Image (spheres, coloured by chain):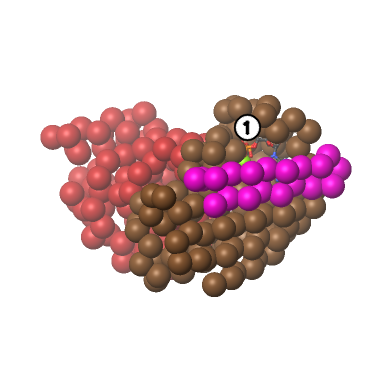
Amino acid sequence: MKLNFQVEGGNFAKAGVASSEVKKVLKKLGVPPMVIRRIVVALYEAEVNIVAHAQQGIISVDVRHDKVEIELRDKGPGIGDISQAMQEGFSTASEEVRAMGFGAGMGLPNIKKNADELNIESKVGEGTTVHITNYFAKP
Amino acid sequence: MTVKDVQKALELEVFGGKKGLDSEVTGGYVSDLLSDVMGNATEGLAWITLQTHLNVMAIASLKDLSTVILVNGNKPEEDMLEKANEENIPVLGTKLSTFEIAGKLYQLLNS
Ligand SMILES: Nc1ncnc2c1ncn2[C@@H]1O[C@H](COP(=O)(O)OP(=O)(O)OP(=O)(O)O)[C@@H](O)[C@H]1O
Ligand SMILES: [Mg+2]
């Protein structure tokens, strides 16, 4: 089953729509709650990163019988140094975004902790693509 | 202990999400950083915060938290309240500070 979502940079009112839809779908399919929780944390953080840091993006979720594959592709500033961005506490979030409680620099570390497989590609000035794969049972 | 038990014992105002008052409170978590809560909070916790916007409810719902307690007399923004009612997650409030209400909740849950 494939699900697609569009994400608008700066639109915090819509942040989390994809995550909550995916949560509902996985719940209906009977995926174990512990597995759903990890997927939802990773997806939410990646979704919010598009809203907070990029201009626009597309999320494609592919639910297979044994796993879920997620691609988040955005047009935005890109990430110059990915290993620096992965460090807990590193953030370039604006003052405005920080006032809402985002910008702790914990999103990417949360994704890493909760994704079974994670791959990030980015081109400065063009955009970022995040791939997350999680398995329903331990392989 | 249910959200309602906590709400009564700590004399908290109920702003919305009343249908979730019977949920079980498994503990508490105090933070105003959203990705901290996303990463570290667990199912059933009561989240004490001063954040009053819609994204708070998105996180509370995704993490299956039992309730959100707003401190210092803060009130939820309109869209946060709507989302609370949609998701049936109670949003409660107190005039007390984070320090005071967290202390009281800790005592209540561990007594
Ligand atoms: N999609 C993206 N496009 C451009 N830059 C990004 C993107 N995702 C992350 N970054 C960069 O990586 C940094 C760290 O991201 P991370 O999610 O860990 O923290 P944050 O978003 O700043 O804060 P938090 O997630 O704790 O609210 C960001 O501040 C930003 O500089
Ligand atoms: Mg982030």
Instruction: Specify the amino acid type for callout 1.
Output: Met
User: Where, by quadrant of the figure, is residue A81 drawn?
Assistant: top right
Q: Position of residue B78 (x, y in %)?
A: 54, 60
Q: Name the residue carrying label 1.
A: A86
Residue at (26% x, 57% y) in the render: B23
The outermost residue toward the front is A139
Q: Position of residue A30 (x, y in %)?
A: 36, 67
Chain B rendering hue = red
Magenta span main SS: strand
Q: Position of residue A129 (x, y in %)?
A: 71, 49
Shown in brown, the chain is A
The outermost residue toward the left is B111
Q: Position of residue B107 (x, y in %)?
A: 20, 32
Q: For residue A67: magenta?
A: no
Residue at (30% x, 49% y) in the render: B44
Label 1 residue SS: loop
Residue nearer the viewer, A66 or B88: A66
Residue nearer the viewer, A131 or B89: A131
